[in-house]
């Protein structure tokens, strides 16, 4: 493989410089001359109709490139989408050696957030927990890749309660939290329950709700296969989950060098049908954010419909999927007393 950069200087010994402005002042023409001399059958450029990660060439750059390239070569121009996506989505052995520790750090921060060291029922608000995350990451020297979310579901209350809402005994808490370290990202959603006085465990209906989401995780990851599209995995998972009496919504995405990474999507929260962005094929050695929810009526809350959102990061080796640092299978319990 010949690696060249059409610039004055090389790039870290990986790309040799291939432009002498004294001989050819027009940088675009220099690039066109290099391509013409090598006479390739395909000329892949950084454009894509579907994936932002493979669409970095601006309109003005495209115009200048095409203008400099001889007309007979124009028909050879193709999208470099497949190459860009495969490079970005592939997780190397070196990355997978450190990813579990990064994931474990994120899990530990969530565990700390969902504890009495951070939350005092009747006093602490959802927003205060969000900003605690930011303070904690600052102390640890870590960066979030999005602002953390914390919300409350409460018996008798509609939807998710957020912001200055005070956390109370009997609340079901949800968080969405992600960090970036060594260019790798995490993306996690966990649940916690604030015990009422004299309670020692969460209501059975809430525990069953998380178990339902775990079951959909299992169904989803079992349908991963090399060469199968994200849309196919979505359809297979939904069909099996619905047949089992579950009420799922699946919106799983690749993860790695970006939080919502390169590669095919598996559903969207607002579209549970096939989508062009889910048409890409699943490849081996890729990391995934297994993001989904199930809805269930909780008997202890008078049959109230509750949203059991979960998200765990996993690695697909081409044969099976494993969670990078395990997953939540029990609701975290927060005592209401001292």
Image (cartoon, rainbow, N blue to C red):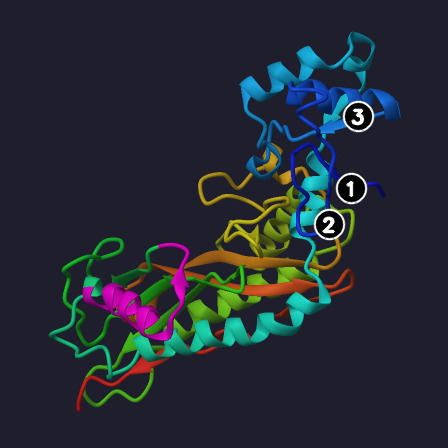
- Circle number at residue 123: none
Quadrant housing residue 1? top right
Q: Identify the residue under disc 1.
A: 3
- Res 40 → quadrant: top right
* Mark pair 3, 2: CA separation: 18 Å
Q: How far across and how far down the image is residue 56, in percent?
A: 57, 32
Residue 245 visible to an observer of this rendering: no
Q: Is residue 46 above or below residue 3?
A: above
Q: Residue at x 12, y 75 (%)?
A: 122
N-term-proximal mark, 1 vs 2: 1
Closest to the observer, 105 or 64: 64
Query: Under tag 2, what secondary structure?
Result: loop
Q: Residue 14: which disc?
A: 2
203 relative to 168 in the view: left or right: right
In the rendered view of the protein, which quadrant contains the C terminus? Answer: bottom left
Q: Report the magenta stretch's main SS.
A: helix
Q: Residue furthest left?
A: 123
Give whichever of 283, 279 is nearer the camera.
283
Tag shown at residue 34: 3
Q: Position of residue 114 (x, y in %)?
A: 31, 76
Side (left or right) of 18 relative to 263: right
Mark 1: secondary structure? loop
């Amino acid at each position: 493989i010949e690696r060249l950069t059409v610039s004055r200087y090389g790039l870290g010994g990986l790309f040799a410089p291939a432009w002498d402005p004294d001989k050819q002042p027009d940088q675009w023409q220099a690039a066109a001359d290099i391509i013409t001399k090598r006479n390739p059958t395909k000329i892949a450029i950084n454009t894509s109709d579907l994936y932002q990660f493979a669409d970095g060439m601006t309109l003005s750059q495209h115009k200048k490139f095409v203008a400099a390239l001889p007309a007979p070569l124009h028909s050879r121009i193709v999208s470099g989408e497949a190459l860009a996506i495969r490079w970005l989505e592939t997780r190397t052995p070196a990355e997978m050696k450190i990813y579990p520790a990064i994931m474990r750090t994120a899990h530990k921060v969530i565990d700390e957030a969902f504890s009495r060291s951070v939350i005092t029922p009747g006093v602490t608000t959802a927003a205060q927990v969000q900003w605690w995350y930011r303070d904690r990451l600052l102390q640890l020297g870590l960066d979030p890749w999005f602002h953390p979310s914390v919300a409350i579901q409460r018996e008798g209350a509609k939807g998710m309660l957020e912001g200055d809402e005070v956390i109370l005994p009997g609340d079901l808490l949800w968080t969405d939290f992600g960090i970036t370290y060594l260019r790798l990202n995490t993306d996690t959603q966990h649940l916690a329950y604030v015990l009422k006085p004299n309670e020692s465990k969460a209501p059975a209906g809430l525990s069953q709700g998380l178990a339902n989401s775990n079951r959909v995780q299992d169904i989803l990851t079992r349908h991963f296969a090399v060469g199968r599209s994200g849309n196919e995995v979505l359809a297979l998972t939904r069909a099996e989950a619905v047949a089992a009496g579950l009420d799922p919504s699946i919106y799983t995405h690749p993860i790695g060098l970006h939080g919502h990474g390169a590669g095919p999507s598996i559903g969207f929260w607002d579209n549970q049908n096939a989508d062009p962005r889910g048409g890409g094929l699943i490849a081996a050695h890729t990391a995934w954010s297994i993001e989904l929810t199930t809805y269930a009526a909780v008997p202890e809350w008078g049959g109230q419909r509750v949203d059991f959102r979960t998200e765990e990061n996993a690695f697909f080796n081409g044969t099976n999927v494993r969670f990078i640092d395990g997953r939540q299978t029990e609701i975290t319990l927060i005592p209401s007393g001292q």
